[in-house]
Amino acid sequence: AVISYERLKDPITGPNELKRIAAALRGKKKMTVMPDDGIDCVWHDTWVKNPYPDNDDRDKNGLPRTAYNFTLSQMYMIEDKIVEYKTKYSTGAWEYNPQAQDLVLNFAQYLGDVRAEIDVMEENPPPTAAPNANYTRELVEWYNSKGKGNRYSKGTVQQMGIWDMVKHFYDDH
């Protein structure tokens, strides 16, 4: 069985997801698993009556979840990849595989979450950065520091017969 944390903590799907875990463990050596009729109570006591606040950020040594800010372009790539996997595991040899169908169900949920986040990002795009007045100068300095130096200095380019096509790249034409 493929288990989803999001489905496990959801009040509607959580008890059934916990029953799936129990079914996977039932019958294993040295495992005692309660009957399904008590699992709803266990889920309710564990998730609803829990006296501690939710802690979805379990990586104690890593960055907080809020530190992972994806760009809109990255979100589109994530969305495309989820669609690719959802399609792959929905068709062909995977179509009747129970684990593949579990994945498809999870991908559908993740796709909805990612699409909702993309919608917010599209409605509220990040501000455009202010122009950097030193950008051109820094670019020229960087270019001059590479390889054979500035093979395309203004004087050199003016002698190449292409000046009218490229003069807009130079500050004082």
Image: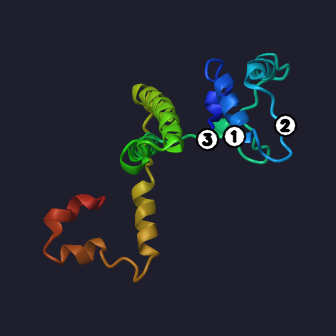
> Reading the chain from its start, which is encountered first: label 2 or label 3?
3
Residue at the image point whose x is 27% and y is 60% from the top: 169
> Reading the chain from its start, which is encountered first: label 1 or label 3?
3
Label 3 sits on residue? 1
Left or right of 152: which side holds 144?
right
Residue 94: % across, % down:
43, 47
2 or 3: mark nearer the eye: 2
Q: CA distance from mark 2 to mark 3?
A: 19 Å
Q: Are marks 1 and 3 in contact (CB under 8 Å)?
A: yes
Q: Quadrant of the N terminus?
A: top right
Residue 24: give its label: 1
Residue at the image point whose x is 61% and y is 23% from the top: 13
Left or right of 70: which side holds 26?
right
Residue 32: give its label: 2
Residue 82: give its label: none
Q: CA distance from mark 1 to mark 3?
A: 7 Å
For badge 3, the amino acid type reads: Ala
Assign a secondary structure to mark 3: loop
Residue at the image point whose x is 53% and y is 35% from the top: 106
Q: CA distance from mark 1 to mark 2?
A: 12 Å
For badge 1, the amino acid type reads: Ala
Task: Characterize the local packing of mark 2: few (<14), some (14-19) or many (20 or more) Cα atoms within 10 angstroms.
Answer: few
Residue 131 sits above or below residue 109 on the image: below
Image quarter of residue 122: top left
Residue 71 sits above or below residue 36 on the image: below
Q: Are marks 1 and 2 in contact (CB under 8 Å)?
A: no
For badge 2, the amino acid type reads: Thr
Q: Nearer the viewer, residue 68 or 81?
A: 81
> Reading the chain from its start, which is encountered first: label 1 or label 2?
1
Residue 164: % across, % down:
14, 64
Residue 69 sits above or below residue 53 on the image: below
